[in-house]
Image: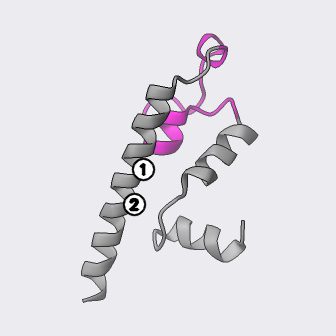
Amino acid sequence: MELATFSAQLSGKRGVAVSTINGIIELYPQLSLEWVMLGRGNMFVSEEKHEHLTTYAEVAELKNLVAQKDEEIKCLNAQVRY
């Protein structure tokens, strides 16, 4: 990932792509997907939960949430520009 892209994502000028989140979870599987995506819950998954794979329904739900948040960010950025 380009540094400018990552910087724009951190500053909120650009939404965080699902591929970025996937990369984070692949590098740090001990991180809770809910915490990474929503800032809720425990930062780390329990050992018991870590053994189970996230279901496709959970992934689809989180992808949908990311898309909604991306759209919300676009709208807010448009409001700030005017």
The boundaries of the magenta stretch are 29-51
Does residue 39 appear in the picture of this structure?
A: no
Q: Which image quarter: residue 1?
A: bottom right
Q: From what the image shows, is residue 69 above or below residue 10?
A: above
Can residue 8 be seen here?
yes
Look at mark 1 in the image and give the residue it sits on: 66
Residue 64, given in percent of the width and then of the height, sits at 38, 44
Asked if residue 50 is among those painted magenta in the image, a careful observer would answer yes
Question: Whole-Å distance between the Cαs marked 2 and 1?
Answer: 6 Å
Residue type marked 1: Val
Label 2 sits on a secondary structure element that is helix
Q: Decide: is 53 above or below 18.
A: above
Which label belongs to residue 58?
none
Residue 77 versus residue 53: which sits nearer the camera?
Answer: 53
Question: Farthest residue toward the top?
Answer: 48
Residue found at the far bottom of this picture: 82
Per the image, the residue denoted by label 2 is 70
Looking at the image, which residue is at 54% across and 57% down? 17
* Residue 82 x/y as whole percent: 24, 89
